[in-house]
Image (spheres, rainbow, N blue to C red):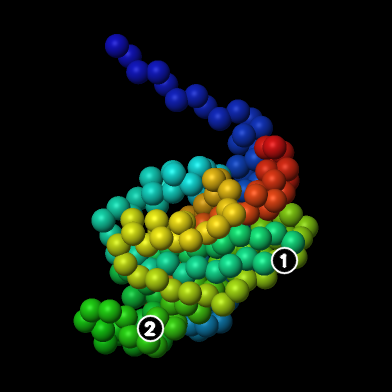
Amino acid sequence: MAQASTPEPSRHDRIRLDALREVGTIGAGHATTALAKMTGRRVMIDVPAASIVDVSEIAGILQLDGQVVAVVSLRVMGDITGHALFVLPESNAVKLSEILLGKKSESSGELNLMERSSIEEAGNVVASAYLNALSDFLGVMSMPSVPLLAVGDSAEILDTALRTVSGASEIVVCITTRFVFEESVDGLAGHYIFLPDRPALRAILAALQLD
């Protein structure tokens, strides 16, 4: 018996996703500028993949099951509220720290204080860049809180992060891109996740004409 084919997205759906992808591209562009200043290296990006999905679908999109991840989380305040997460596989977080600090990691197990601080700072820069792009798209003002870093099993870390977000909607914005640093062989893939509170979700859906 033939399987039913997955329906192609409508023209309007493609336009709306294109608008969200443009927000991701602008945010990634801001992030690369800031990371270039922090590292003294030229930074390039891949075209971001963007989606609005149910919170239960995050694990499937990230595809990080069984991996150790680093998650930088920030509370979003202002005209739109919610929580922002920047998620990296731990191996990518270590590479990013080495680029930022200009030396090989000295940690054989857990990240040391300096490495954690550098990842928090980079996560703050990236998450804030995406947040600013989203705020500009919506025509609102927002600001991030002090970043917090957690490292551990992807399922446990993400589950804890999602459970501690009170008042958030069941819908999240997810933007994935890859940063390529000059003189580095491999790019560093990262995921930006915005968990909007319900009023912020309504504003996002209205702007994308999805309400």
Residue lying furthest top in this view?
Answer: 1
Q: In the picture shown, does residue 98 fall above or below 163?
A: below
Residue lying furthest right in this view?
Answer: 139
Query: What residue is shown at x 68% (from left), y 53% (from top)?
Result: 200
Query: What residue is shown at x 70% (from left), y 37% (from top)?
Result: 211
Foreground disc of the pair 1, 2: 1
* Residue at image mark 1: 78
Tell me the quadrant of the picture where the N terminus can be found: top left
Q: Which mark is residue 115?
A: 2
Q: Does residue 189 appear in the picture of this structure?
A: no
Q: Position of residue 146 (x, y in %)?
A: 56, 77
Q: In the displayed structure, does residue 124 sit left or right of residue 95? A: right
For the residue pair 119 and 185, the one nearer the viewer reads as 119
Q: In the displayed structure, does residue 102 sit left or right of residue 77? A: left
Tell me which amino acid carries mark 1: Gly
Query: What residue is shown at x 52% (from left), y 59% (from top)?
Result: 165
Q: Does residue 93 appear in the picture of this structure?
A: yes
Secondary structure beneath dot 1 equals strand
What is the spatial separation of the Cα atoms under label 1 and label 2, in whole angstroms?
A: 30 Å
